[in-house]
Amino acid sequence: MKKATILSVITLVFLTAIFMVACAESSEKKQTKAVADTSKVAVEITKPLPKLIDLGSKSCIPCKKMAPILDSLREEYKGRAEVIFIDTRENRKAAADYKIAFIPTQVFIDTTGKEVFRHVGFYPADSIVMQFKAMGVK
């Protein structure tokens, strides 16, 4: 009888652990989806300007080096082009939507919403400016 009780307790603990993991994953997916939808909407409802969408992470080293560049360009091109950062670790759906394999990845989108250029890795400011010029941004 003692073995049966121990076996029942072990089974109950095991099933509880499985249930908790499943609930946590489900909750994470719902939360990620909500965040992803918000970011995607933010990109779509803004003015019809050319866009640079930088997909990365706040914790990756090349992404951290890109942050001040993006901030500077966001101010410099205000009203002429949008510079958007999406953290792919917080927003996994956006990473999937943009088919991101490595971070950082910069995606340039024209005024019609069509992707016109993509770069993977650190991308210096002068190269971003050249790409904006190639897209007709002055």
Image (spheres, rainbow, N blue to C red):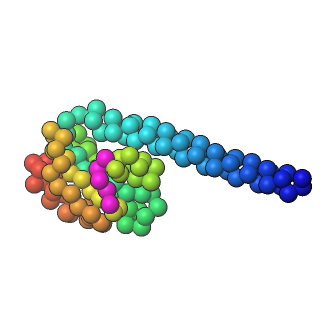
Quarter holding residue 67: bottom left
Q: What x and y, as percent, mark residue 46? A: 27, 34
Q: From the viewer's perspective, is 115 left or right of 64? A: left
Q: What x and y, as percent, mark residue 40? A: 33, 39
Q: From the viewer's perspective, is 58 left or right of 10? A: left
Residue name at image x 32 percent, y 60 percent = 101
The foreground one among 26 and 54 is 26
Circle count: 0
- Is residue 46 among what the camera can see? yes
Residue most extreme to the right: 2
Q: What x and y, as percent, mark residue 76? A: 25, 50
Queried whether the magenta region covers residue 100, the answer comes back as yes
Residue most extreme to the top: 45
Residue name at image x 33 percent, y 35 percent = 41
Q: From the viewer's perspective, is 111 left or right of 104? A: left
Q: From the viewer's perspective, is 34 left or right of 75? A: right
Q: In the displayed structure, would residue 132 be above or below residue 49?
A: below
Q: Main secondary structure of the magenta part?
A: loop
Quarter holding residue 134: bottom left
The foreground one among 95 and 116 is 95
Q: What x and y, as percent, mark residue 81? A: 21, 44
Residue name at image x 41 percent, y 49 percent = 92
The foreground one among 57 and 36 is 36
- Is residue 74 among what the camera can see? no
Q: In the displayed structure, would residue 123 be above or below residue 92?
A: below
The foreground one among 129 and 106 is 106
Residues rendered magenta in the picture: 97-101
